[in-house]
Amino acid sequence: MADSIGSSPDSETHQINYRVTGASSGTIFSEGSVKEQDRLLPIAIVGRIMKQILPPNAKISKEAKETMQECVSEFISFVAGEASDKCHKEKRKTLNGDDICWALGSLGFDDYCEPMKRFLQKYRESEGDRAAPGGHNKATASSDSRDDIGNQAQMQSHGSFF
């Protein structure tokens, strides 16, 4: 869980304590000052994802976007924290997709585990296709990968990955 501590109206910097619950309940794995803009997903991205799911004529208030922005950013931190704790125990420094899938299950988000595993499999297959001879170069593949992940919500709503 992230707690805002010591924020001031003049600054967008907040003291954040991330606590991982579960097997190591109450463990603080990262502590420090984080700028608000670095802690939250960009509001435009959050709004775009929300619009893709809602009917075309739906309107979304600024308050709704900001609330969702806080929630999804907190969710990402929560899941990544659990995965990070696992990696730390296993003396690894790099989180991978399997760690995220494990963390989702560990935290009780079982409904998201299988769809995420299917997405991860398709993502890895598409990365393999790009690495094949005649495929994109590494820089292009990296850029395309970000585009693929950025469009995940749209693909989900059309059944491409889930």
Image (cartoon, rainbow, N blue to C red):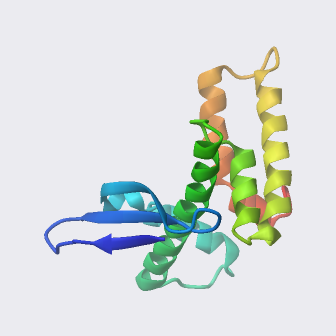
In the rendering, at what x and y percent does residue 156 appear? 78, 63
Q: Residue at x 48, y 71 (%)?
A: 1
Q: Is residue 107 left or right of residue 66?
A: right
Q: Is residue 72 left or right of residue 29?
A: right
Task: Classify residue 43 by image quadrant.
Answer: bottom left
Please identify the residue farthest to the left as the structure is shown.
10
Q: Residue at x 80, y 69 (%)?
A: 110
Residue lying at the far top in this picture: please name it: 133
Counting from the top left corner in percent of width and height, residue 132 is at 82, 19
- Viewer-closest of 90 and 8: 90
| Residue at the (66%, 29%) spot, across then down | 141
Give whichever of 44, 14 is nearer the camera.
14
Q: Left or right: where does residue 44 sit relative to residue 22? A: left
The residue at the point 80 percent across, 52 percent down is 119
Where the C terminus falls, by quadrant? bottom right
Numbered marks: total: 0
Q: Is residue 73 above or below residue 146?
A: below
Q: Where is residue 151? Give x, y as percent.
A: 67, 54
Q: Is residue 150 above or below residue 1?
A: above
Q: Position of residue 31 (x, y in %)?
A: 36, 56
